[in-house]
Amino acid sequence: MRLKYIFPLFLFLASMLLITIFFLLDYSWIIIPSFIVFYPMPYLSGLKETAKNKNVVIKIKNKSPYIIPMLFFSLPTIIINLIFLFTDLFALILFFMVYIISVVFYFLGIYILIRDLKKQFEIEDKAIEIKEDQTKKRLLLINPVNKEIAGLTINPSSTFPPLGLGIVAALTPETFQVKIIDENFEDFEYENADLVGITAFTSVANRAYEIAAHYRKDNIPVIMGGIHASMVPEEALKYVDSVVVGEAESVWSTVIDDFLNNTLKQKYNGVHLDLENSTIANRDLFSNKYLFGTLQTSRGCPMDCYFCSVSAFNGRKYRQRPYKEVLDELEQMHQRMIFFVDDNILGYGKGAEERAIQLFKGMVDRKLTKTWFCQASLNFGSNEEVIKWAARAGCKMVFLGLESADPEELKVMDKKLNLQLEYKQAFENINKYKIAVLGAFIFGSDSETEKSMYRKVKYILKNRIDVIQTTTLTPLPGTRLFKELQQNERLIYTNFPQDWKFYDMGHLTYHVNNMENEQFLDHHRKCSRKLYSRWTLYKKFLKTWIHCRSFQTAMWAYNSNKNYRNVSFSND
């Protein structure tokens, strides 16, 4: 550690000795242990945690890594000195003066460190700037964001790199110069290009069409892919020149050849390839401001839940990458914090579980030192061997699509697997290995009633749901739910494509079954306020700390809960 970071500590200790000798010698028996003996520990810990969590501190301005060491020092120090010095007002005043000086010097050291870390990030940002090469065709890949409705993009810590665009960039021949414009961190500004590729979720489809119009008026071809265009290709073709339906890996080389030959087709249908030797995303094109790196180890889902479009896009066959290839890719990633974007990293069946164990063991054997979270089905909590190795490999949190604890609701949603497993035992098993449970719950199923909404809240507050994600049931195109509600004329917003912006998991987009819409919205607001109150979040933090016996896991959970609180209240 550089001397300039520790110099404020030396300066404080020297001044502290002088103050004690000249003014507080009679109280040296308590002042010296408080400040000279114990103060260096939180000071050095604050520097260490700030450097260790520099991404969190710099990228999302999270103060926890350096605030918490100071809190641990301040609380017992103030209490002990108040007890022993309360009879001497002069000594008490001097103590608080010394305490304030200690805080000033502490934050001086942190400030110097953070200033240097910011300079490092600025250097890294400049390093990824792309120089123009006039000899190459220019492919512009765009990740649009709906600025009207924030959703999870309200906080940079809950946004993730556009992995699909990174894969497309890697598939593109070197005769092209590729750039990604990512609206998570920069507003779109027109840039010249020979070819444009856009991806979009349903709630940002209009923004994608808006950007596409800028290029089409200049006769620059625009290709759109991703989940929304794949589900409604005929709609997308009204706004773009070509649509890639499904996974791009099997067709992108054909798309490029057709573009070069001026024979671009309107539609390209991707097929589900085996995931051995999968293309690794070009992460050099991603913004350095992302907190998490993303990685995919599997695709497809056999469950086919009626509200989910994953099986329609990636198929019902569960495909896995060889775990050694995943480990090789992880070794190449410079990010310390990772999100495995698989819909279910564990998979289905004993063979898939063994593969997951081998993956986690491999992370330990290769000493990858990553901290990460993932998505899985509830059976993640049934196999302690899986949980044990996930924890050793650095897992801090697992997202479980619980949806409800009510069997009737689960039947309506076709969540067959959840009906077969014991929630409580799964939560305890996961917490046992210092991993937080991120429980995802849905409001608005056809069996939902006023009473069941409040039962759900009570269940979440009572049980080991360390992180709370609540969404409104959303009928996305390509799902059985959308088709059913559309046929029964229950959709509220039907002016497509303009109304797609409301299909963001936070808005009520259909007429609910057992109450008036306004009643549902009123009860939903009350439920959200109770679930995401500051008091609830503080209690969840303490419970996670106790159940997981890990302060780091508790902080992961608390910061995640703050994100979901912001999202929930932004939709009120």
Image: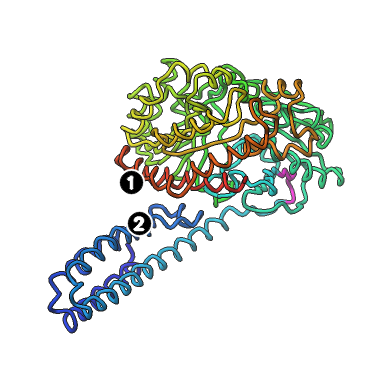
- Look at mark 2 in the image and give the residue it sits on: 68
Q: Is residue 180 left or right of residue 206?
A: left
Q: Determine crowd level at label 2: few under 14, some 14-19, many 20+ residues with C-alpha closer than 10 A.
A: some
Coordinates of residue 64 in the picture (x, y in percent): 40, 55
* Residue type at numbered disc 1: Phe
Kindly report the distance in space between the C-alpha atoms of the residues bearing marks 2 and 1.
10 Å
Residue 333 position within the rendered picture, expressed as x and y whole percent measured from the top left: 48, 42
Position of residue 184 measured from the top left corner of the image (x, y, whole percent): 62, 48
Determine if residue 147 is in view.
yes
Q: Which residues are magenta?
A: 134-140
Which quarter of the picture shows residue 526? top right
Identity of the residue drawn at 41% across and 15% down: 350
Residue occupying the point 51% across, 22% down: 320
Q: Secondary structure at mark 2?
A: helix
Callouts 2 and 1 close, C-beta under 8 Å: yes
The colour scheme applied to this rendered structure is: rainbow
